Amino acid sequence: MYKLAAIDLDGTMLNSYGAVTENTKKVIKETISKGTEVIIASGRPIDSIKTIAREIGSEKYFIAGNGALIYDIKKDEIIYDKYMPKEKVLEIIKICEENSISYNVYTDKTILATALKYNVLYYHKENLKKEENKKTNISIVENMYEYVKKIKEERFLKVTVCDDNQTVFNSIIRKIRKVSDIEVLDVSHMSRKMIRQGTEEIPIEYYYTEVSLKNVDKWNAIEYLIEKLNIKKEEVIAIGDNINDKEMIEKSGLGIVMKGSTPVVVRCSRLCYRYK
């Protein structure tokens, strides 16, 4: 019997509009009732995950920031963290600013952005449908470098970098890779999300990558958690769709990928299943 199921959010548990379907909620709640613990393993910050965890009936733990932290829901506290040092965040911000490319800084509580573009625009549109206490926290910052420099609590999960021009995007990523002690996700495909504008459906398309501290990934967080829960890795199911899910899909007892997942993730899995 599988004792733990770790499930990604965007592109996996959530549909293209950022919602959990009623059928998905039903399946997850049935799985929990049969004794398998279901946890969310996402790149999002804490508050963005909390409300979804409540929706699906997951009451114990979740993984945020692509494995940068584990949150204990019942105790309302972080039990594991691998934050990015401020100097690394500032170094990446400087590269992005000098090359005029869009980026966002994720802390454990909020997403810092200079404009509502790409993934942040998607979260903003998602927020319009939510109650105030269920929204993803987004802070628009005019001078990101100075703002981050003044932050006293250094709880930085990751930096995301986005652009709709692949040539521009790739050239900046090559520069970021020269920064020491960080991991840059090797994302080569274009992300595509849908937003509703009145009666119209508008796609948001962009290339992106995620930058975190070296050796931070969802599987390392899962390993910490299963040791705490006395669960073997063979008793873990991991479900995802993107490169940030590769490690957990590859190393868990059963790795499941979504239909339409990035090819490198499909190649590392043992089962391809449409979970929505």
Image (cartoon, rainbow, N blue to C red):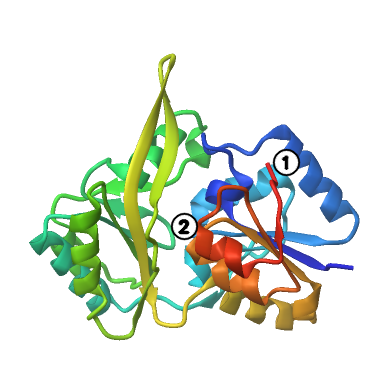
Most extreme residue toward the top is 199
Quarter of the image containing the N terminus?
bottom right
* Up/down of 216 relative to 254, above or below: below
Residue at image coords 60%, 75%: 219
Please identify the residue farthest to the left as the structure is shown. Answer: 98
Q: Is residue 139 above or below residue 122?
A: below
Q: Secondary structure at mark 1?
A: helix
| Residue at x-position 63% and y-position 51% | 258
Q: Is residue 53 above or below residue 122?
A: below
For the point 17% across and 62% down, the residue is 96
Which-is-in-front pick, marks 1 and 2?
A: 1
Q: Nearer the viewer, residue 14 or 153?
A: 14
| Three-letter code, disc 1 | Thr
Q: Which residue is mark 1?
A: 24
Image coords of residue 239 (percent x, y): 66, 59
Residue 249: x and y, percent?
64, 68
> How crowded is the residue under tag 2: few (<14 C-alpha within 10 Å), some, or many (20+)?
many
First in sequence: mark 1 vs mark 2? 1
Residue 160, quarter of picture: bottom left
Give residue 78's quadrant in the image.
bottom right
User: What is the distance, in whole Å, between disc 1 and disc 2 at their CAs?
Assistant: 22 Å
Q: Residues within 10 Å of mark 1 (few under 14, many from 20)?
A: some
Q: Check disc 2 and report the residue beneath it.
A: 45
Q: Label for residue 254? A: none
Residue 186: percent from the left, percent from the top? Answer: 39, 68
From the top left corner, tell me how far across and down residue 144 is, in percent: 18, 58
Q: Check if mark 1's residue and mark 2's residue have beta carbons within 8 Å.
A: no
Q: Nearer the viewer, residue 86 or 24?
A: 24
Residue 56 in view here: yes
